[in-house]
Image: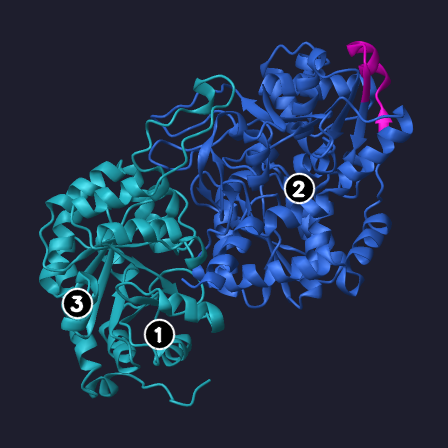
Amino acid sequence: MSKSDHEHHRERDSEATFGEYGGQYVPEALMPAVQELEDAYERYVLNNEDGFMDEFRERMADFGGRPTPLQRADRLSERYDREIYLKREDLLHGGAHKLNNALGQVLLAKYMGKERIIAETGAGQHGTATAMAAAHLEMPCEIYMGRTDINRQRPNVYRMRMNGAEVNPVTAGSATLKEAINETMRDWATTVETTHYVIGSVVGPHPFPKLVRDFQAVIGQEAREQIRERAGRLPDSVVACAGGGSNTMGTFHAFVPDDAVDLYAVEAGGSSLEIDEENALAPNSATLSTGTGGVLHGAMTKLLQSEDGQIMESHSVSAGLDYAGVGPELSHLVDTGRVTPASVGDEAALNGFHRLSNLEGIIPALESSHALGYLEESHDELGDLVVVNVSGRGDKDLETVLEETEKRDLEAAPDVEVFGQ
Amino acid sequence: MSDIEAAIRDNHPALITYLTAGDPSLEDTKAYVEALDRGGADLIELGLPFSEPIAEGPTIQAAINRALDAGTTPAGFFELVDELETEAPLLVMTYYNMILQYGDSEAPRASESDAAPPQSKPDVRLFVERAAEVGLSGIIVPDLPAEESEPLRAACDEHGLDLVFIVAPTTEGERLETIMSQVSGFAYVQARLGTTGARADVSNATHDSLARLSAYDVPKAVGFGVSKGDHAAEIIEAGADGVIVGSALIDIVAESDTPAIDLEAKAEELKRGAIRGTDGTGEDEIDAPEPEQP
């Protein structure tokens, strides 16, 4: 290898990785497309070529409803005896932070001259956001979704269809998010010359983790400005839920250089943190808290895996957190100590859901409810001024919540039996 | 010259076969590999099953699921290879995470200790060491592009194993140069975009790819979609040194009442087809493509 080759390799490495995580572990057929995307990321996103970022921000304001408010939660502040502020991403068009990334990528695909959009979806939130963005920008769109998820998230399937997207059921394995990503990658390997894959989180091969983070970073940028206006200073801590990690990185990114601000990534503890090695099953999705390094879906990152390296089935009451991997940058920030991983179980999340609904009049997504569950459990450690990201609204979760609440004796739940009569 | 390169050059035109190890059991795989060896396979790829096979089509996905359901592990896989005594050299085809995690059971899980200790970095050398020990001649990793291959390549060099790279229809220009300069064993020419799986015809992309590669003096074998003797003839006639067949063999494993007998016969058919491709008689049995076709 000549010296210049070596230097080129090293330079590429530092751009494609976060410490030992990240990289581009994809089939050869996809490498040219991944490199084309790297080029587009640099030109349009980092350098605002042809006014790309200006158009993105303008559309996020007009179509998306940005900026979203930072709201003081009066009852929670009283309950926990400290200042609690909520970043209201649930008020973004579509009801979750997902549109930030979906609109950004569909617009980027247009600038790149791509003719077709594909995406995977787990709970259906990324799928609906992508379908909306594709309709808004007149791009044909196909969404891959696990059969299990289709059955438990029917309203989102209808929303995607209404926005003109095709929904392709995936039946392999447990027929959830992991299998949907596999199948979308297979489609992309076939149609790569004309199609852009709008990946739904800060996962996948470089440049996706950075690209998605940069589109989501508006959450933290706004929150940082808003809290300084409202409270006159930066918060002591920022709390966000973490599945793949797009709302997490979006919320944290602007705060990472602020050493005095503690960052908490709250994962789904499911029913237990113990791993069932025999059945290759993790009854949780706490990848940052319990996972080990490996390669999945194009990146080196922390994973829920068996000793042999088989990826485990994960579990959470919240479909949107139910994933055996996590963004490589989050893995790195956890290893360096900048981000503290935490987890709360299904029950604490359900209580968090009911508490915010009942006390503040905001029905949060079950994903966001994990951050609220952590606030209840650990508020004493979070300082006097806390920002919690409410990544989405919970209308999509009502059926699951009713079902799960009926099974349990939850302290924060209202009497739901009347609904069954 | 490596075992693999010699197997292709000395047996030109070469037949390369793929089976998923452990489908439906490791004992069955042993019998099937021996049948393919008897039938004329010059090189045999064995898939070590991984739970997320993103490069595979439905046929091999199903084979991998059967193998995993049967409890196939890397340890069992290596024992099988150790027992096999084939004339054809053996390669392992698996995904990168299986190589990274092999033999790493000593690494502590984060949950078992306080204050996140620096995890022992996954190390690819243990896998390569064991592969060499049981007599494997090479490794193919569908989710490891040349850009990420340095650690594995170094380990393979150290143990005298070939690390085989895939050349896709989208591989052009500088990337093609880079990959062709690193060819070890042979260049695995992906016949078409998409995933693995038997097809009814030979894609035009095959002819384009072989034309693009004709200037490079390395063995070239074509896979993805090859299922019949006639395909083999057409591909060899188009300039390939070998054909790679997987899904068509897995169909036999899944559907035949006498898989070993049928696999041996299929290998014979494919090898005969490949040989036909070298003497020009292949044209009589197939619709030869228009040479000028885009």
- Tell me, yes or no, whether dots 2 and 1 are on the same chain: no
What residue is shown at x 45% (from left), y 66% (from top)?
A: B193
Mark 3 = which residue? B6
Q: Mark 3 lies on which chain?
A: B
Tell me if residue B252 comes above or below residue B71 in the rendering: below
CA separation, marks 2 and 1? 40 Å
Q: Mark 2 lies on which chain?
A: A
Q: In this view, does A405 lie to the left or right of B37?
A: right
Tell me if residue B52 comes above or below residue B4 in the rendering: above
In the picture as drawn, the residue positioned furthest to the front comes out as A3
| Crowdedness near tag 3: few (<14), some (14–19) or many (≥20) residues, C-alpha within 10 Å | some
Quarter of the picture containing the C terminus of chain A is: top right
Q: Which mark is drawn over residue A125?
A: 2
Q: Which mark is drawn over residue A109?
A: none
Q: Mark 1 lies on which chain?
A: B
Mark 1 = which residue? B201
What residue is shown at x 72% (from left), y 60% (from top)?
A: A44
Colour assignment, chain A: blue
